[in-house]
Amino acid sequence: MFRLLGFLIGSASAIVLLLLLLGVPDFHLTDSADDQQRFDAAVEKLKEKQQEAAAVAEVIVDEVATAVADAQDNVELVTEKALPLLSAQMDEALPPPEDEILAPVTENAAIAEDIPIVVEDLQWYSFWNPFRSEIAANGFVSQLEKVTGLDYRVVKIKTGVYEVAFAFADDVERRSKISQISMATGLELPDS
């Protein structure tokens, strides 16, 4: 209670002292006529700015319309000139008659029967720890493909387990690809 009373008396005495030293401030209350004049002047400036913006927008719209019309005219001229050229090129690019096509095909088919077709069974080798998301695994694959130039696949083992693997035909190829990845990336891979 005494603290509150002391605070009030101190504040009042400080205000009285300031008023005595500096004097009573003179508040100039303005007329409503002055306020109205300033308001009207501000409104006039805003109207002028709005008219300027409308004029500039109209000029821009006109320029865009003429540019579009010119572009359409140019497209029509180019297509009129290009159509005869394209039709001439299409006539030149027509395939030869069927009898010219079938003769080499039948000859090559007889030769192809003598050549055994070798289909390699490619195996996939997972060389890195599994990723928890497919997005992370795909990001890793894209960076590895940029650096090494090899082909990789993301293999989904189960939900939340994605492995990165590359194809190989034999153990020699697998080891060479592992060493190529190690040299290109600096990663410590087993069997490198």
Image (cartoon, helix red, strand yellow):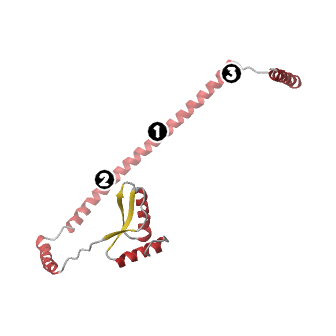
Cα distance, mark 1 to mark 2?
Answer: 27 Å
Check the image and name the residue furthest to the top. Answer: 32
Q: Quadrant of the C terminus?
A: bottom left
Cα distance, mark 3 to mark 2?
Answer: 64 Å
Q: Quadrant of the N terminus?
A: top right
Residue at x-position 29% and y-position 71%: 122
- Provide the secondary structure element on which disc 3 rests: helix
In this figure, which residue is indicated by the disc labeled 2? 76
Q: Nearer the viewer, mark 3 or mark 2?
A: 3
Note whether 37 is above or below 87 in the view shown.
Answer: above
- Tell me, for residue 125, which label it has, or none: none
Amino acid type, callout 2: Glu
- Closer to the N terminus: mark 1 or mark 3? 3
Position of 123 compared to 178: left or right?
A: left
Label 3 Cα crowd, 10 Å radius (few <14 / some 14-19 / many 20+): few
Amino acid type, callout 1: Glu
- Residue 159 location (% of width, % of height): 37, 54
In this figure, which residue is indicated by the disc labeled 1? 58
